[in-house]
Image (cartoon, rainbow, N blue to C red):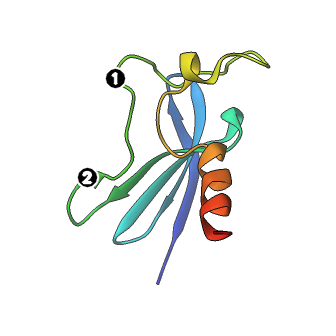
Amino acid sequence: MTVRIDGNWSYHGLPLVRLESRWLAVDVLARTGGRILRIVDKVADRNVLWENPRVAPHEAPIFASFDDHWAGGWDEAWQTALTDWMSV
């Protein structure tokens, strides 16, 4: 399987890295902590992650309220939740 990595993208002024195969595209916002913004099922032409319609991705100040700045996608909090779930 061939995977292409393209760092020549941006979204709302933030650098975006796209990892893409024949079936899947993953968009990663590097300057927001490596947040996965989108996972697109290319066969169904559908983003499988939720996007906040009211908050665009942006760099938030340190110690800012998570809920006020979360634009959707897959954030680091998901990894903690998965770790907790797997330890049950």
Q: Amino acid at mark 2?
A: Arg
Secondary structure beneath dot 2 equals strand
Viewport quadrant of the C terminus: bottom right
Q: Is residue 71 left or right of residue 61?
A: left
Determine whether 18 is above or below 86 in the image.
above
- Residue in view at x 64 percent, y 55 percent: 79
Q: Amino acid at mark 1?
A: Pro
For marks 1 and 2, the one nearer the N-term is: 2
**In this figure, which residue is indicated by the disc labeled 2?**
46
Look at discs 1 and 2 and give the one toward the viewer. Answer: 1
Q: Which mark is residue 53?
A: 1
Where is residue 34? Give x, y as percent.
67, 44
Judge by depth and name the residue closer to the eye, 27 or 85: 85
Q: Is residue 7 left or right of residue 20?
A: right
Which residue is at the far bottom? 1
Secondary structure beneath dot 1 equals loop
Where is residue 83? Give x, y as percent.
67, 62
Q: Is residue 11 left or right of residue 82?
A: left
> In the rendered image, which quarter is residue 52 located in?
top left
Q: Which mark is residue 61?
A: none
